[in-house]
Image: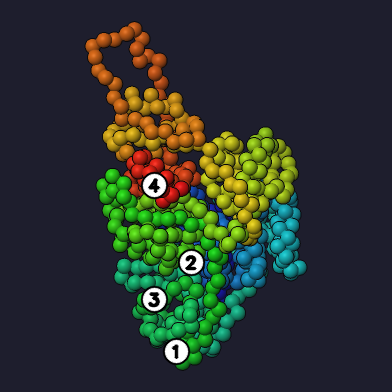
Amino acid sequence: MNIRNVAIIAHVDHGKTTLVDSLLRQSSTKLHKDMAQKEFIMDSNDLERERGITIFSKNASVRWNDTKINIIDTPGHADFGGEVERVLRMADGALLLVDAKEGPMPQTRFVLKKALALGLRIIVVINKIDKSDARVHYVHDKTLDLFLELGASDEIADFPTVYAAAKLGKAGLEADLSKMTDISPVFEAILKHIPAPPVDAEKPLQMLITTVSADTFKGRIATGRVHNGVIKAGQDIMHINREGQMKKYRIVSLMTFVGLERVDADEVLAGDIASISGIPEVVIGETIADVLNPIPLPVLEIEQPTVKMTFSVNDSPFAGKEGDYCTSRQIQERLYKELETDMALRVDDGLAQNQWTVSGRGELHLSILIERMRREGFEFQVSRPQVINKGTLTPFERVFIEVPEVHSGVIIQKLGGRHGEMQDLRTENGIAFLEFLIPTRGLLGYRSEFLTDTRGLGIINATFEDYREDPGNWREREQGSLVVHETGTTNMYGLLNVQGRGVLFIGPAVSVYKGQVVGQNARSEDISVNVCKAKQLSNMRSKGEGGAEHFNAPKIMELEDALQYIGDDELVEVTPKNVRIRKTILDEAEAKRKEKMGLVR
């Protein structure tokens, strides 16, 4: 059977998911009735649909003539490098999707660098050529520059190019929309330029596990590529773990991909992608091998985490009122379950009881985990994100920014104050392109500020660079918090009295508790406020009373806003219904006493 294993690489919003949709439909792949009517078939997770990004790698397969093409979708964000690293191991080539206006972007660079290191054959697809401001030749030259910059060999840098308008389901070898009829040139390019997997069906069985998922009936399902040999339903296999220890198991079920569905199979040949169940302790990066001649494959190495947060059981006055899962046992089980499928995540016991230190690749990586747990019904609280240093060394990021030229001055000023060093600045058609090298700590909490400074018109991307000396002399948050004085329900009269002190995060008729943060103070210190105060009623009225009162719309703090806002003495309380900001020690007098004793900062 002819097989091609192809990964799809693209920056966020360059049309990767749309292209996969077109390939599935063009090949007349039979889709589940729920999927057939939807756009963005591959972005099956609610969070992916809402944010328009791919977070979890997924597999699909299509038949083109007599060839089976396995399509491997890769996340486009550097924070999900753990996913990218391993799924590329299943591929023999890749489609590099590039926007016909924007050209190759930072996250494209990140995934392409991984693909080139593995020696994958690359086909460049210049997408969205139907846009009025498409710059096809410019983008082609920039893509070639990127290949050369990343050290691609002459053979790989001489890449084949396909032009496409994935939304219209059209592609061609020339950038002329009128000559395109369908998406088939993409399939033809795959068959011509991507090599068939180099395998030997006569060799002993070797399969590398790259994804693990849970199933209610089948238990843990391990997915990976069969590198050599043949795997058969019901056969005995040897499981080789990361330490090299071996244990014999029998396969309970064997599946392969048809379209987006897993279907049962009697056998899967070398070169194809298979899913198996029956191995209760299987972990990503391990080998399934022949019982008589077990030969392990190289264990997958994953980039180390750079940001950590403390998760803990919710101990606020509202604890247990809004979540289904609130206990330490439930939260710990959920965190450790995530480790089965997320190789870039680390979970360790915290300094105190009912606390866990969770480390990941970046703020987005951890906030996605928090949001998923919240939607599953979990209730807990998290601390401010902190970078993971190695002695005096701290992680640095390379930041790429694209903003209207009028806003470039404030960006340079703000990042300079966060120890950012400008590496490059160029301007094209009123748009400024800036490149900075900045400590990861300098980026924490900056993204929301960036959107405000650029009026929402800026694009910011960052990729991990390396560890360097910590510059020190960090400025802490310049503005304090408005902290609730007493437990109760917010009242419009109390809110009107407080709003002149800063920016409020909540409106009237909201339940609050003593020690909860309800706004940002205009000055540097925290202020205790009474937002539950009600007006004393009397039968005395004066002319015009209340006519000039105006309540400003509060700034609603979503999860990521709250994580970026909080200080070291604050926590974010996360429940399925609400995201609240609170002081770690709710009682102001107790907090001051502990600070004097040196128990807290």
Can you identify the residue that label 2 sits on?
343
Can you identify the residue that label 1 sits on?
291
Residue 408: numbered disc = none
Q: At numbered mark 1, what does the secondary structure look like: helix, strand or loop?
A: loop
Dot 1, crowdedness within 10 Å: few (<14), some or many (≥20)? some
Three-letter amino acid code at disc 1?
Val
Residue 244, position as x, y percentages in the image: 48, 83
Can you identify the residue that label 3 sits on?
281
Q: Earlier in the sequence, mark 4 or mark 1?
A: 1
Q: Earlier in the sequence, mark 1 or mark 2?
A: 1
Give the quarter of the image for residue 151.
bottom right
Image height check: is 351 above or below 493? below
Dot 3, crowdedness within 10 Å: few (<14), some or many (≥20)? few
Q: At numbered mark 4, what does the secondary structure look like: helix, strand or loop?
A: helix
Q: For the point 39% across and 65% down, which residue is it?
A: 336
Q: Earlier in the sequence, mark 2 or mark 4?
A: 2
Image height check: is 67 above or below 108? below
Whole-Å distance between the Cαs marked 2 and 4? 39 Å
Whole-Å distance between the Cαs marked 3 and 1? 17 Å
